[in-house]
Image: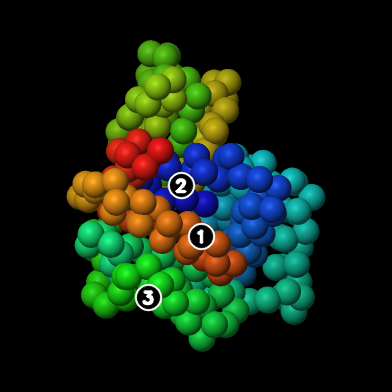
Protein backbone atom coordinates (compact mmCIF):
# COMPACT_ATOMS: atom_id res chain seq x y z
CA UNK A 1 0.00 0.00 0.00
CA UNK A 2 2.53 2.78 -1.18
CA UNK A 3 3.83 5.17 -3.75
CA UNK A 4 7.25 5.10 -5.33
CA UNK A 5 9.45 7.97 -4.10
CA UNK A 6 12.28 5.58 -3.24
CA UNK A 7 10.07 3.93 -0.63
CA UNK A 8 9.94 6.83 1.82
CA UNK A 9 6.22 6.05 2.20
CA UNK A 10 6.87 2.33 2.65
CA UNK A 11 9.51 2.93 5.30
CA UNK A 12 7.06 5.07 7.23
CA UNK A 13 4.46 2.31 7.10
CA UNK A 14 6.91 -0.33 8.27
CA UNK A 15 7.70 1.83 11.31
CA UNK A 16 4.04 2.53 12.04
CA UNK A 17 2.75 2.57 15.59
CA UNK A 18 -0.22 0.46 16.68
CA UNK A 19 -2.82 3.07 15.72
CA UNK A 20 -1.27 3.54 12.28
CA UNK A 21 -0.97 -0.21 11.85
CA UNK A 22 -4.69 -0.60 12.43
CA UNK A 23 -5.32 1.90 9.66
CA UNK A 24 -2.93 0.07 7.32
CA UNK A 25 -4.67 -3.26 7.95
CA UNK A 26 -8.05 -1.62 7.35
CA UNK A 27 -6.87 -0.30 3.98
CA UNK A 28 -5.66 -3.77 2.97
CA UNK A 29 -8.98 -5.33 3.97
CA UNK A 30 -10.88 -2.75 1.94
CA UNK A 31 -8.65 -3.42 -1.09
CA UNK A 32 -9.15 -7.20 -0.78
CA UNK A 33 -12.94 -6.85 -0.61
CA UNK A 34 -12.97 -4.53 -3.62
CA UNK A 35 -10.78 -6.96 -5.60
CA UNK A 36 -13.04 -9.92 -4.79
CA UNK A 37 -16.17 -8.05 -5.84
CA UNK A 38 -14.70 -6.53 -8.99
CA UNK A 39 -13.08 -9.82 -10.01
CA UNK A 40 -16.10 -11.90 -9.09
CA UNK A 41 -13.99 -14.51 -7.32
CA UNK A 42 -12.35 -15.19 -3.96
CA UNK A 43 -9.88 -17.54 -5.63
CA UNK A 44 -6.57 -15.73 -6.25
CA UNK A 45 -5.68 -18.16 -9.03
CA UNK A 46 -8.67 -16.82 -10.96
CA UNK A 47 -8.46 -13.20 -9.83
CA UNK A 48 -5.20 -11.36 -10.56
CA UNK A 49 -6.26 -8.22 -8.69
CA UNK A 50 -6.91 -10.31 -5.59
CA UNK A 51 -3.56 -12.06 -6.02
CA UNK A 52 -1.76 -8.74 -5.93
CA UNK A 53 -3.80 -7.49 -2.96
CA UNK A 54 -3.02 -10.65 -0.99
CA UNK A 55 0.66 -10.37 -1.77
CA UNK A 56 0.74 -6.79 -0.53
CA UNK A 57 -1.26 -7.67 2.60
CA UNK A 58 1.02 -10.57 3.47
CA UNK A 59 4.17 -8.47 3.24
CA UNK A 60 2.53 -5.99 5.61
CA UNK A 61 1.79 -8.89 7.98
CA UNK A 62 -1.99 -8.62 7.84
CA UNK A 63 -3.34 -11.53 9.93
CA UNK A 64 -4.66 -14.40 7.83
CA UNK A 65 -7.91 -14.48 9.83
CA UNK A 66 -8.60 -10.89 8.80
CA UNK A 67 -7.90 -11.73 5.16
CA UNK A 68 -10.17 -14.81 5.23
CA UNK A 69 -13.02 -12.87 6.81
CA UNK A 70 -12.66 -10.06 4.27
CA UNK A 71 -12.95 -12.53 1.38
CA UNK A 72 -15.95 -14.24 2.97
CA UNK A 73 -17.74 -10.92 3.50
CA UNK A 74 -17.06 -9.84 -0.06
CA UNK A 75 -18.35 -13.13 -1.44
CA UNK A 76 -21.47 -12.76 0.69
CA UNK A 77 -22.36 -9.70 -1.35
CA UNK A 78 -24.88 -8.09 0.96
CA UNK A 79 -22.65 -7.79 4.02
CA UNK A 80 -20.22 -4.91 4.21
CA UNK A 81 -19.85 -1.86 2.03
CA UNK A 82 -19.32 -1.77 -1.71
CA UNK A 83 -16.34 0.39 -2.57
CA UNK A 84 -15.77 2.32 -5.77
CA UNK A 85 -12.26 2.89 -7.06
CA UNK A 86 -11.60 6.59 -7.63
CA UNK A 87 -8.52 8.55 -8.63
CA UNK A 88 -7.79 12.19 -7.83
CA UNK A 89 -5.15 14.24 -9.60
CA UNK A 90 -3.52 17.52 -8.73
CA UNK A 91 -0.41 19.44 -7.79
CA UNK A 92 1.29 20.24 -4.52
CA UNK A 93 4.06 22.61 -3.44
CA UNK A 94 6.83 23.30 -5.97
CA UNK A 95 4.65 21.95 -8.77
CA UNK A 96 4.92 18.34 -7.56
CA UNK A 97 2.37 16.16 -9.37
CA UNK A 98 0.15 14.00 -7.18
CA UNK A 99 -1.97 10.96 -7.98
CA UNK A 100 -4.26 9.67 -5.22
CA UNK A 101 -6.03 6.31 -5.32
CA UNK A 102 -9.03 5.75 -3.08
CA UNK A 103 -11.69 3.16 -2.36
CA UNK A 104 -14.89 4.77 -1.18
CA UNK A 105 -18.53 4.05 -0.39
CA UNK A 106 -19.30 7.78 -0.48
CA UNK A 107 -17.74 9.76 -3.31
CA UNK A 108 -19.00 13.11 -2.02
CA UNK A 109 -17.33 12.59 1.35
CA UNK A 110 -14.05 11.44 -0.16
CA UNK A 111 -13.66 14.20 -2.71
CA UNK A 112 -14.46 16.79 -0.03
CA UNK A 113 -11.75 15.36 2.24
CA UNK A 114 -9.20 15.16 -0.57
CA UNK A 115 -9.99 18.68 -1.74
CA UNK A 116 -9.58 19.96 1.82
CA UNK A 117 -6.05 18.51 2.03
CA UNK A 118 -5.11 20.05 -1.30
CA UNK A 119 -6.39 23.43 -0.15
CA UNK A 120 -4.85 23.28 3.34
CA UNK A 121 -1.43 22.47 1.92
CA UNK A 122 -1.51 25.05 -0.88
CA UNK A 123 -2.08 22.57 -3.67
CA UNK A 124 -4.79 22.34 -6.29
CA UNK A 125 -6.83 19.63 -8.01
CA UNK A 126 -6.74 21.15 -11.47
CA UNK A 127 -5.05 19.42 -14.39
CA UNK A 128 -4.22 15.82 -15.28
CA UNK A 129 -1.25 14.05 -13.69
CA UNK A 130 -1.89 10.36 -14.40
CA UNK A 131 0.11 10.54 -17.63
CA UNK A 132 3.23 11.30 -15.57
CA UNK A 133 3.18 7.88 -13.89
CA UNK A 134 3.74 4.31 -15.07
CA UNK A 135 2.28 1.26 -13.33
CA UNK A 136 4.83 -1.36 -12.27
CA UNK A 137 5.13 -4.27 -9.91
CA UNK A 138 7.69 -3.73 -7.18
CA UNK A 139 9.38 -6.24 -4.89
CA UNK A 140 11.83 -5.36 -2.13
CA UNK A 141 14.28 -7.96 -0.79
CA UNK A 142 16.57 -7.57 2.22
CA UNK A 143 19.26 -9.23 0.13
CA UNK A 144 21.19 -7.61 -2.70
CA UNK A 145 23.66 -10.42 -3.27
CA UNK A 146 24.64 -11.47 -6.77
CA UNK A 147 22.56 -14.61 -6.31
CA UNK A 148 19.49 -12.55 -5.42
CA UNK A 149 20.03 -10.31 -8.44
CA UNK A 150 20.42 -13.28 -10.76
CA UNK A 151 17.29 -14.93 -9.40
CA UNK A 152 15.38 -11.66 -9.78
CA UNK A 153 16.35 -11.44 -13.43
CA UNK A 154 15.33 -15.07 -13.96
CA UNK A 155 12.00 -14.27 -12.25
CA UNK A 156 11.26 -11.60 -14.84
CA UNK A 157 12.72 -8.41 -13.39
CA UNK A 158 12.73 -5.48 -15.80
CA UNK A 159 15.02 -3.38 -13.63
CA UNK A 160 16.94 -3.67 -10.38
CA UNK A 161 17.90 -1.03 -7.84
CA UNK A 162 20.37 -1.45 -4.97
CA UNK A 163 19.82 0.55 -1.78
CA UNK A 164 22.12 -0.33 1.09
CA UNK A 165 21.55 -4.03 1.72
CA UNK A 166 18.17 -4.04 -0.03
CA UNK A 167 17.30 -4.97 -3.58
CA UNK A 168 14.33 -3.38 -5.31
CA UNK A 169 12.93 -5.30 -8.26
CA UNK A 170 10.59 -3.83 -10.87
CA UNK A 171 8.33 -6.01 -13.00
CA UNK A 172 5.48 -5.68 -15.45
CA UNK A 173 2.21 -5.40 -13.48
CA UNK A 174 0.94 -8.78 -14.67
CA UNK A 175 4.22 -10.49 -13.71
CA UNK A 176 4.35 -9.33 -10.09
CA UNK A 177 2.75 -12.33 -8.43
CA UNK A 178 4.61 -14.84 -10.61
CA UNK A 179 7.92 -13.16 -9.75
CA UNK A 180 7.11 -13.28 -6.03
CA UNK A 181 6.27 -16.99 -6.22
CA UNK A 182 9.50 -17.70 -8.14
CA UNK A 183 11.63 -15.85 -5.58
CA UNK A 184 9.89 -17.49 -2.61
CA UNK A 185 10.49 -20.90 -4.16
CA UNK A 186 14.21 -20.05 -4.05
CA UNK A 187 14.05 -19.10 -0.38
CA UNK A 188 13.82 -15.33 -0.84
CA UNK A 189 10.98 -13.74 1.14
CA UNK A 190 10.05 -10.22 0.00
CA UNK A 191 9.84 -7.45 2.57
CA UNK A 192 7.32 -5.87 0.25
CA UNK A 193 5.52 -6.70 -2.98
CA UNK A 194 2.81 -4.60 -4.58
CA UNK A 195 1.72 -2.67 -7.61
CA UNK A 196 2.91 0.91 -7.66
CA UNK A 197 3.06 3.92 -9.94
CA UNK A 198 6.47 5.31 -10.78
CA UNK A 199 6.95 8.90 -11.92
CA UNK A 200 8.55 9.20 -15.33
CA UNK A 201 10.40 12.30 -14.12
CA UNK A 202 11.07 13.21 -10.49
CA UNK A 203 11.00 16.72 -9.03
CA UNK A 204 14.02 17.85 -7.03
CA UNK A 205 13.10 19.83 -3.90
CA UNK A 206 14.85 22.10 -1.44
CA UNK A 207 14.39 21.38 2.27
CA UNK A 208 11.50 23.84 2.68
CA UNK A 209 9.43 22.44 -0.17
CA UNK A 210 10.37 18.86 0.74
CA UNK A 211 8.93 19.34 4.21
CA UNK A 212 5.70 20.78 2.77
CA UNK A 213 5.26 17.90 0.32
CA UNK A 214 5.90 15.23 2.95
CA UNK A 215 3.34 16.80 5.30
CA UNK A 216 0.82 16.94 2.46
CA UNK A 217 1.34 13.29 1.53
CA UNK A 218 1.02 12.27 5.17
CA UNK A 219 -2.27 14.20 5.42
CA UNK A 220 -3.64 12.28 2.41
CA UNK A 221 -2.48 8.97 3.92
CA UNK A 222 -4.42 9.75 7.10
CA UNK A 223 -7.70 9.75 5.18
CA UNK A 224 -9.51 6.43 5.65
CA UNK A 225 -10.62 6.22 2.01
CA UNK A 226 -7.17 6.86 0.51
CA UNK A 227 -5.27 3.73 -0.46
CA UNK A 228 -2.16 5.08 -2.16
CA UNK A 229 -0.51 8.43 -2.77
CA UNK A 230 1.99 8.82 -5.58
CA UNK A 231 4.04 11.90 -6.31
CA UNK A 232 6.80 13.08 -8.61
CA UNK A 233 8.77 14.36 -5.61
CA UNK A 234 12.19 12.83 -5.09
CA UNK A 235 11.51 11.95 -1.46
CA UNK A 236 14.70 9.97 -1.01
CA UNK A 237 16.80 13.12 -1.17
CA UNK A 238 13.97 15.04 0.50
CA UNK A 239 14.03 12.74 3.52
CA UNK A 240 17.73 13.46 3.93
CA UNK A 241 17.11 17.20 3.68
CA UNK A 242 14.32 17.35 6.23
CA UNK A 243 15.65 14.61 8.51
Measured as percent of width and height from the top left, residue 19 is found at 69, 53
* Secondary structure state at the residue bearing disc 3: helix
Residue 187 in sight from this viewpoint: yes
What residue is pinned by disc 1?
Answer: 221
Q: Residue at x 58, y 21 (%)?
A: 187
| Nearest the eye: 52 or 24 | 24
How many residues crowd mark 1 within 10 Å: few (<14), some (14–19), many (20+)?
A: some
Label 1: which secondary element: helix
Camera-nearest label, 3 or 1: 3
Position of residue 96 measured from the top left corner of the image (x, y, whole percent):
26, 59
Using the numbered discs, state the Cα–Cα distance from disc 3 to disc 1 in whole angstroms.
Answer: 16 Å
Disc 2: which residue = 9
- Residue nearest the viewer, comparing 122 with 182: 122
What label sits on residue 199 in the rendered view?
none
Q: Is residue 207 above or below residue 92?
A: above
102 or 147, which is in the foreground?
102
- Does the CB distance between marks 2 and 1 fall below 8 Å? yes
For residue 20, side relative to residue 167 (left or right): right
Q: Which residue is mark 3?
A: 119
- Which callout, 2 or 1, points at the residue further toward the start of the chain? 2
Location of residue 144 by image quarter: top left
Amino acid sequence: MAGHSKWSQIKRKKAANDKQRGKIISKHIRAIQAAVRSGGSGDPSANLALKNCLSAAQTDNVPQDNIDRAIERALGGSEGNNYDEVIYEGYGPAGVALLIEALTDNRNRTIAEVRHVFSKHNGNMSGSTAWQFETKGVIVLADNSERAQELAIEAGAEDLELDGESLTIYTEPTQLYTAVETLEAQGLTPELSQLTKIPQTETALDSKDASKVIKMIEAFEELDDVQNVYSTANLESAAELVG
